[in-house]
Amino acid sequence: MIRKPNFTTARFPRRGALVGLSVLATLAAACGPGEDGDSKSPPHDVVINLGGEVSVLKDLNARPRVVGPRPVGAENADAYRLTTPRQLSSGEIVGIRDGGVVAIEPREPDRAVLLGPAGAWFPSSDGKRLWAVTEEPAHTACTGQELPQSVSTRFTVSEYETSGRPSRITLPLPCGLRPIAETPRGLLAERTTGDSGGAGTGVRAVTDIVLLNARADATTETIAKDASVVAASGKVVVWRGDACRKGSCTHVYDVEKRKSTRTPSCEGNDPVGVGSLDPSGRWYAGDLRTSGLAILDLDQGTCRVLENVSAPDAGDLEQTFAAAWSGPSLMLLDQRSGTLTVVNAADGKLEERAEPLPVVNQAQIWGTATN
């Protein structure tokens, strides 16, 4: 039997006195999460789950210090794994584990605070709080309503602080609306309007991208029709037209300007799949159609191709890399080789760790320590 850590405000198993935690006290101030400055300082004190063992890298080439050893009986499993890990601008690392949303302080990555039940989550628009998403089957929650076949769930969102206090705001969404993110002008959602495809090909939901009112029970604006959200952060929404089959299919919507534009040109090599948008909403990293990797500067309208970083096939970034942002620095951990690369999106400077990390079971970069 695998003995897993107790994640309800509990500590992971320790190894000795865990002196490795002391390295978390000295992160460079310019590398705080969510900052959009042009700092050239590389990330320090990076918290990484190597696939069942949580470690800290004091700098890019430092030896990993184990702060969360493998629990007894979990040699071939990952008891620490988070679904959709991301670091809030307030510093806490948040993700889904065992059916609940948890918050982790980078200075104590061996402690996870269980906030509440969730199947998904996303940050608040200010990056300091979060929304937990729960589901109820449509056949019980949407009885009597005529809905597209692809609507199988009704969603509810609850706002949490990372302190562990109970949620004071819970909003059940109408059937057919799936919450995606919070923007300065309200919750962002995909609204299912119909089905596409049929027997033998599967049924695909046809969705519009919409903004919701304060009660999340009605739409206030339609951003795009027959489209899906690729990424969202702050006032920026990256979306793709689902009916688009060639050319540039990816767009950027500015919530404050209420305007969509095409993503910056990469010399005819268009972004595909799901990439990673930094917390400020300025830089977007993702695969290109010809299997290259690029960082788009959405403010300046430029594209920087990363010639020394490659993926085997064009698609979602996470298929090949564990990725995380620290200010303007993008950290990429290759799941195949263990190679760790840091790219400064502001100036294109690329640094690669001298020795690969011992990755197993799909490693994850959780974030960096904060002052």
Image: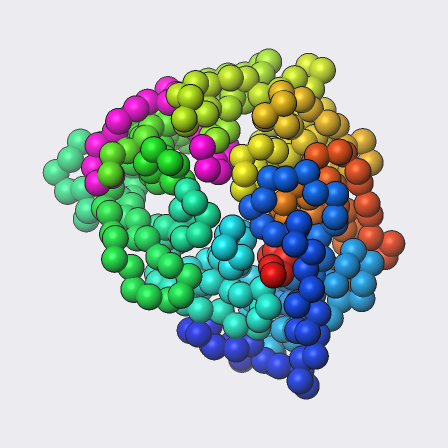
Left of 85 or right of it: where is 292? right
Q: Position of residue 222 (x, y in %)?
A: 32, 22
- Tell me which corner region of the image, top left, top right, bottom left or bottom right, holds residue 173: top left
| Outermost residue, left side | 144
Q: Nearer the viewer, residue 35 or 212?
A: 35
Above or below residue 32? Residue 106 is below
> For residue 60, which quarter of the picture?
bottom right
Q: Nearer the viewer, residue 162 or 116?
A: 162
What residue sits 30% from the left and 53% below the top?
158
Q: In the displayed structure, does residue 26 sit left or right of residue 131?
A: right
* Highlighted range, magenta: 215-235
Q: Nearer the viewer, residue 342 or 204?
A: 342
Tell me: 343 left or right of 236.
Answer: right
Residue 267 included in the magenta stretch of the image:
no
Mainly helix, strand or loop, the magenta region? strand
* Residue at point 45%, 25% (across, down): 254
Residue 45 image position (x, y, % from top left): 69, 61
Residue 226: say if magenta. Answer: yes
Q: Is residue 312 visible?
A: no
Residue 232 visible:
yes
Position of residue 106 relative to residue 362, above or below, is: below
> Residue 116: which quarter of the image?
bottom left
* Residue at screen point 46% across, 48% down: 127
Which residue appears farthest toward the right when viewing the image?
354
